[in-house]
Each structure stands twice: as C-alpha cells, then as structure tokens.
Amino acid sequence: MVVAALMAVAALLFGATGAAADSTSSNSAVEGKTFVIGTDTTFAPFEFRDSSGELTGIDIDILKAIAEDQGFNVQIRSLGFNAALQALSSDQVDGVIAGMSITDERKQVYDFSEPYFDSGVQMAVAESNDDVSSYEDLKGKTVAAKTGAEGEAFAKSIAKKYGFTVKSLDQSASMYELVKSGNAVAVFDDYPVLAYGVAQDNGLKIVTDKEPGGSYGFAVNKGKNADLLAAFNDGLAKLKASGKYDEILDSYLADPKAAQPTTFWQLLGNSLPALLKGLQNTLVVTGISFVVAMVIGMAAGFMKIARNVVLRGIATTFVNIFRGTPLLLWAFMFYFGIPQLTGQPINIWVAAVLTLSLNSGAYVAEIVRGGIQSVDPGQLEASRSLGLGYGKSMQKVVVPQAFKIMTPSLINQLIIMLKDSSLLLAIGFAELLYQGQQIYAANFRVTETLLIVGVIYFVAVMLLTKLANFADRRFNK
Amino acid sequence: MSTSTTDTTGQPKIQVRGLRKSFGSNEVLQGIDAEVAEGEVVCVIGPSGSGKSTFLRCLNKLEDISGGHVVVDGFDLADPKVDINEVRRHIGMVFQHFNLFPHMTVAENVMLAPVELKKASKAEARKQALELLTRVGLAEKADARPAALSGGQKQRVAIARALAMNPDIMLFDEATSALDPEMVGEVLQVIRDLAQTGMTLVLVTHEMGFAREVGDRVIFMADGVVCEEGTPDQLFGNPQQARTREFLSKVL
C-alpha cells in the first residue's frame, strides 16, 4: 500500500517524461519494489490454479518473467476479471493482467502496455450438439459470453443479424456449464481459452474459425504507475527477443493437456488442501465477524429500547440501512467504493469483516431487542423494587433471561453468516466457495467440485450447530 | 438513610400529598392525600380501576409521579435529586404475580440484593437467606428453582426476598389475588406474623376479612381519590359514604 502511494506520487511528479526516460534506461525506478497485480480467477490458460492450487498460466508466467528481468517483485491477487478492474480503479492494485483486450473504451480509464498476445474469438458448442455449426444455426437461441470480454462484444455485434440472444456471465467455467446443461447452445470466447478448455475435456467442441480479434495488454490506472508500465514493455521486448516468450506460450497452447485428476478420488485428494484452506478462511472470517456483530448488535439492541430518542433513532437507522440493503452491495462498497472516495486502500479482511458484521449486527440488534422485550416487565420491576439500579437489574435479572430466549436465534444468525460469507468470493476473498471456483476453473470438473464444497459446508454447519446447541445446554440451564 | 431524617419522631413514615398520576390523558390518581404512621398496618381496598395499585406503586416510585408529593422517611420521591435506589432498599415490595427470578434458585433470589447492594459475602447472604426462608417455612426449598414451587410457596419466597434488605416498610400489591384459594391462608399467615413485628405495612387487598382483622386502618379508594378512611370497625361497620356502602355490599 505504501509502495502504491509512493508510485502514485512519483507518477504525478514525473508524468509521461519519467515513463519515457525509464523505457530507455535500466529500470532503477521499479527495481526492488513490490507491485500488487490483480488478475482473473478463471481464465485458463492465461490464469488458473494448477492441481496443487498454485496460480499459473500465460499471464502469470509472462508477468513473473518480466518481473525477474526487470528486478521487481509482484504480489498477485486473483480477484476475478471485473473485480480486478474495479480494484485497479480504486488503486487497490497497481496493475491488472487478465487476458484483457485493449479497447478504446478501456483506454479512457487505464493506460495499456504494448500488446503481449493477439487473440481472436471462436464459437464452441456442446460435444454432443450436431445441430449448431455456424452463426446461422443460432436463430432464436441463447449463447453465453463473458462479461466485458472480447467474445461478448463480438457476439453482441452479430446477435441482431443472426437473431440470437447473448447471456453474459462472469466466468468461463460457468459459461461452459451453461452450454453443457443446454441453457445456452453456444459460447463465444477467446480462442486460446476455448482451445485449452477443450483440451481439458470440458465437454465442448469448437465449430467456427477464429474471428480476427483484439490484443491483450497489461493495464495500470490512468496516469499512475508509469514506471511499472515502462518496465513491463521493456521486459516484454526482451522476452520476445530471447525466445522465452514463445516458450511460455507453447507450454500452454501447443501441448496444453496437463496432468489433470481423472477419478473423483484423485480430484478430491488434489483439491482438498486448497478447499480446507478456504474453509479455514471461511471459519475465521465468520468467527471474527460474529464477535463484532454481537458487540454491534448488543449496543444497537440496547439503544433501540433506550428512552433517549437520539439513541433510538441512531440504532433504528443503522438497523434499517443494513437490513434494507444486500450484503453483496456492502462487500463491493467497502472494498471498491469507499477506497475510491477516500483514496485509501482497504485490507480485504477488514472489508470482509465490516461487510459481514454490520449486516449481521443489524439482525442481532433486532434479536437482542426482541429478547429483552420478551422478558416479563415484572422481572425488572421486582429487581428495581429491591433497590438495584437499571444497569445492575439488566445485567443480573433481565439479560440472563433474554439471552436464553435469544440463543436459538443467535445460533441461526451465526449459521446464516457462515453461509453468507461465500458471497465474499465476489471481491476475491479466498473463502471456501471461492477456492472451489478456482479449482473447477482450471479443471472444469464443476459438478464434482461443487459437490465436495457443498459437503464441506454442510459438515461445517452441522458441527457448528451441534457445538452451539451443546453450549446452549451447558450455559443456559 | 441518614439518621437525621429517620429520627423525626412524630412525623408519619409515609406522607402523600396531592398525589396525581396520569397515563397519557387518563388521570388515574386525582389528588391523593394519605399518611401512614410508623408501625401502622394500612389496607387499601376499592373496586378494580380505582387506582389503588397505582397508588401503591407510587410509594416506591415504580410509577413516575405526575404531580404532588410522596414523602417516605423524609425523602420526597417527587424530587429528582433523591436517590430512589437508596430509598427502595428500605421498602420491600411483594407483587401479585410473585415475579421471582426464574433463572436463580430460591436462595439466590433472596440473596441477590444483599450480595449486590450490601456487598455481603455469598456465605453471609446465604445464611441470612436461609433464616428468612425458615421464617416463611421454606428452608428446605432453598436450592429449588421457582418453577418447582406452588403459587403459595412462590409468594412466600417473594416475601422472604423483599425482607432480605431489612426494610422498615413493606408494600403488598394484591399478594393473594393470583393464588388458588387453598394457598391464600399460608401467605396471609406470613403477613400476619410480619404485622405483629411492628413493621410498617401497606396492603392493597381484596381479602376484606383479613383487612378487618389485621389492618390498623383501612383506606377505601374509588375513581382515583380516597373516598373514605378509618379503622376497620368504622369503615366496615359504619361506612359514611354511599360509594363505600355500595362497594361493601358487593364484596361482603
């Protein structure tokens, strides 16, 4: 984050001249520095997780090779295509490499490197589908394309002419599933992606020739990180000259059939470490968020029953806002929206905990209020008539009874939170379902992977429920 | 309470002047004047809705006072500067529905105030609680939960709890109204014993026979005012007001 800020200042100070000077000299401007680079989660062969859970792909290899050549370090965040671009706009990352086509529209907001790959769009259909082999066969049908990608732009440009509908999705694997399940008849995607997927037995076949398409570029935020951009261009030129560039491409495109798990048990064995890491993140973020939500919810719940109109108003407003808006909106808001307003990047854990705990806090507040109000008012009167003050009476008499009433609802809230934490995958938080996506994005074993993820969630929730009920019986005798 | 105020011999223990209480636009107490002397047993009777329970609840400020004054041991409860928690330690209260704390044992119910307010040790408080429970005949139930008790037993525990801070005034708000008839006697017996100790008691009650037997004085309330008061013999034997006669003719 400090580096990003320094780079931003440097870019402002030296502007374009700095960049021009750097491209010809040795790259002392970036040497030894660490840049955070955003990328897609699922764009094999440009970026995907190999069977050991390591991020790999053409983009990753090129970026690492350039970084090595130019002497800077990269920290790669696989956020998803749209999330990566939003992160770039909000300076959460210094650059994005995500098989992204260079378009005039994007040039308005980002600065691009020299093209590092020339792509093109192809159409693929389900292996068993012999009815669709050209654009003409698409009349009245639905096709899938990737949001914001070249394939989507091309599909939309011919949709009217051939009379089909385009359904845009965020991930390659989801598009392929859509086609295999028959909800779409064809998919338009960049040729290396399709070729790689078909080679991995993703159940599709390519039926059209490559449409001449755009070129992929590495992007930085407009007017920022000029040094990094210059270093990328310089490194890319050297890579091409040395033949290393072709070597990387060939390793993915010429013989892409990597060792993939064949049986379910192999898949399970390969994916389990990554999934358990995801489960750990899920449990930790849920645990922290629940504690914070309890504190927030207790405070807001007591404020809601306060005599003071201002306190009541604050609590009611808080509850209404967070109950009345989707969780996902707040995830985006905290991770992408607010950093753009403040100019201050936010740690993904902070954004995740804020999202979950504020949302849950609103529900906990209502549970607390309801719990306290359901205790017979005679209890408070009896305690007050003994001479105990309001606070003491609440603490000794009302809250213990209210807590007993609240416990089942709180356990419920905890379980809802654990499952809702999966929504955090949208901002690239590496929780359980996100890890699952990463795995099937690379091996296209969608159903089996989701099944494994589902079982892990189910077992986690069952164990949590048992534990909570045990605690309930233990403490609320 | 400081000795300077408790020593005001001759001054009534409780003095109520022009007490008014409204719930919204509904004025339940419309100017009550009453006095209770030290050691006196006063029974408050009257038809339902007459405001007698509200009157009693004003005596320890469970209800906020809308107008007038309630002076207990020299402390005016209408004065916001008076520490009501301090005053309440000297006034025990027993409710119609017992209001025992269900999450505590019988002994813990009785011990709560001494432990929290007098900072008594658990052992001391328990010893005192057992004495009080013996007094109401329930020592063997000390470690039971309130849910395991009969109505009469619950009310006797509630009385023991109210006595735990050694109050000099006890307020009873229809203490036997929620009880099955066969349990009324055991509770009345405990109250009767209390009256004989010389404690100041104010009872809102429907037990006319008991009021006549135990009360030093009876106050008849109707429509938010004190309609008539006097000794039990005067009020029950020779009521002066038509409203009193009408009420007594229905309940006796």
Image (tube, coloured by chain):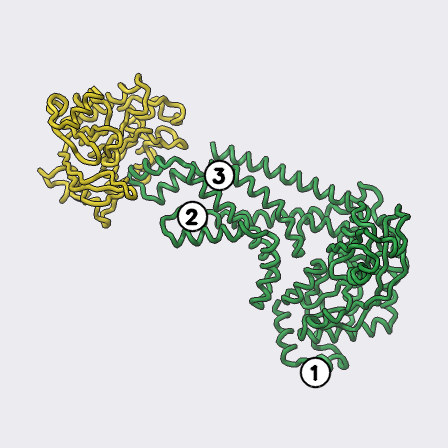
**x then y, percent, for residue A89:** 65, 67
The answer to whether residue A54 is seen in the rendering is no
Whether the residues at callouts 1 and 2 have beta carbons within 8 Å, the answer is no
Quarter residue B87 falls in: top left
**Of labels 1 and 2, the one closer to you:** 2
Q: Which residue is mark 1?
A: A17
Q: Which labelled disc corresponds to residue A304?
A: 2
The numbered mark, 1 or 2, whose residue comes first in the sequence reads: 1
**x then y, percent, for residue A39:** 73, 61
Q: Residue at x 16, y 22 (%)?
A: B212
Q: Which residue is mark 3?
A: A406
Find numbered disc 3 in the image and state the secondary structure of the residue it sits on.
Answer: helix
Quadrant into which the N terminus of chain B falls: top left
The answer to whether residue B34 is seen in the rendering is yes
Nearer to the camera, A325 or A241 = A325
The chain letter of the yellow chain reads: B
The numbered mark, 1 or 3, whose residue comes first in the sequence reads: 1
How far apart, in angstroms, are the residues tagged by discs 1 and 3? 64 Å
Residues behind callouts 1 and 2 on a single chain: yes
How far apart, in angstroms, are the residues tagged by discs 1 and 2? 59 Å
**x then y, percent, for residue A26:** 75, 79
Find numbered disc 1 in the image and state the secondary structure of the residue it sits on.
Answer: helix
How far apart, in angstroms, are the residues tagged by discs 2 and 3? 16 Å
Q: Give the left or right position of residue B144, taking residue A280 as reference.
A: left
Chain letter of disc 3 in the image: A
Q: Residues within 10 Å of mark 1 (few under 14, many from 20)?
A: few
Nearer to the camera, B200 or A207 = A207
**Of labels 2 and 3, the one closer to you:** 2
The chain letter of the green chain reads: A
Chain letter of disc 1 in the image: A
Q: Which labelled disc corresponds to residue A403?
A: none
